[in-house]
Image: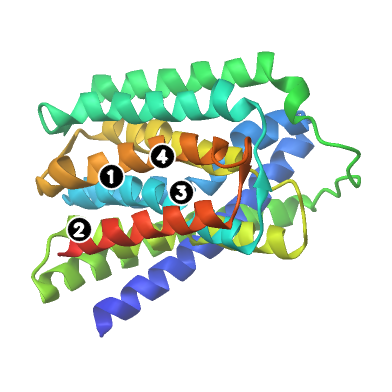
Amino acid sequence: MQDFLFIVAGLVLLIAGGNWLLKAAVDLSLKLKIPKIVIGMTVVSFATSAPELIVSINAALDGFPDLALGNVVGSNIANLGLVLAITILLGPIDVSKSFYTTDWPVMMLASLLFFFFIYFDGVLQQYEGVVMVIFLFVFLVYLLRFQKPAVIDAEDEPDVMLPTYKTALFLGLGGAALWGGSELLINGAVGMATLFGVSERVIAITIVSVGTSIPELAASIIAIIKKEKAISLGNLIGSNIFNLLAVLGITSIITPISVMDQGLLTNDIFWLLGISFLVLPLVFIPKGLRLGWRDGVVLLSVYLAFVYFTIG
């Protein structure tokens, strides 16, 4: 029971900390007069990946590499099989052309890069982490230079900047909550794995990964309820790209990540590649550049099958 409470408390702190850090990061960007497009593609993406990043770094440093890997792999599968599925079950979304020209190919490249780096030797080395971070940097530069017109917002309400003390407070609270939440989550996950006699990987790829995907799920549901058309497949794919290249890239630069439970290489990584690929035909069948409830049923079924076979 204590381990379960640790996991719940850790997730609450991670979600709150990520939200506070996001507010502070966006406000700092506005104070520094960084263009909104740059904020959206870099600051916001990085802040929303902060829970995964802190959990993975902490887990790797604490000697639980499978938690670091399982968290990211499971979170990427959950983003498409759970978050996207629930979103399109609530209402269809239109997919922009950039999905098949940029977003999906880069996500598949990032997934394949991760696969080749870790599959053959079971270790994500520091130099491989450097390659992943460089790939992310090149991708962001490409987005900012060549896709700028496609992502410029319509007329928005003027941004209201926070007082400096509030920005500092959100920054401090966010950082502290993320670190504290990650410690509680890791302790709870390791304790629960020991209690049920399963590996840290199984707990990470199911409970922990869904927990760190809750912010994306909440944002998607709120957008659907408010009938905001801004919600797009690109947001979730961007999150998956950031999780692989930034979270695992930075974590492995700090300390190499070794696979302990071989299930990650024989099971999980293939589910990641499979569900990432599956999104492409779903976008075009039966209606081009549109995702509807039938696609949601398919994705959710795949996710439930993944959880069943992973736990089984």
Q: Which residue is mark 1?
A: 271
Could you tell me the amino acid type at mark 1? Answer: Trp
- Looking at the rendered structure, the kind of residue marked 3 is Leu
Q: Picture coordinates of residue 299 (x, y %)?
A: 43, 53
Sequence-first disc among 1 and 2: 1
One can see residue 17 in this view: no
Asked if labels 4 and 3 touch by Cβ distance under 8 angstroms, the answer is: yes
First of labels 3, 4 by sequence position: 3
Residue shown at the point (46%, 50%) measured from the top left? 79
Q: Is residue 5 above or below residue 129?
A: below
The answer to whether residue 119 is left or right of residue 232 is left
User: Mark 1 to mark 2: distance in Å?
Assistant: 10 Å
Question: Residue at label 4?
Answer: 278
Q: CA distance from mark 3 to mark 4?
A: 10 Å
Say above or below: 245 vs 62. Answer: above
Residue identifier under label 3: 80
- The image quarter in which residue 212 lies: bottom left
Q: Camera-side residue: 180 or 295?
A: 295
Q: Is residue 196 above or below residue 284?
A: below
Label 3: which secondary element: helix
The location of residue 231, given as percent across then percent down, is 68, 48
Q: Which residue is mark 2?
A: 310
Q: CA distance from mark 3 to mark 1?
A: 11 Å
Q: Quadrant of residue 112?
A: top left
Say above or below: 96 vs 305. above
Q: Label 4 crowding class (10 Å Cα cut-off): few <14, some 14-19, many 20+?
A: some
Callout 1: SS? helix
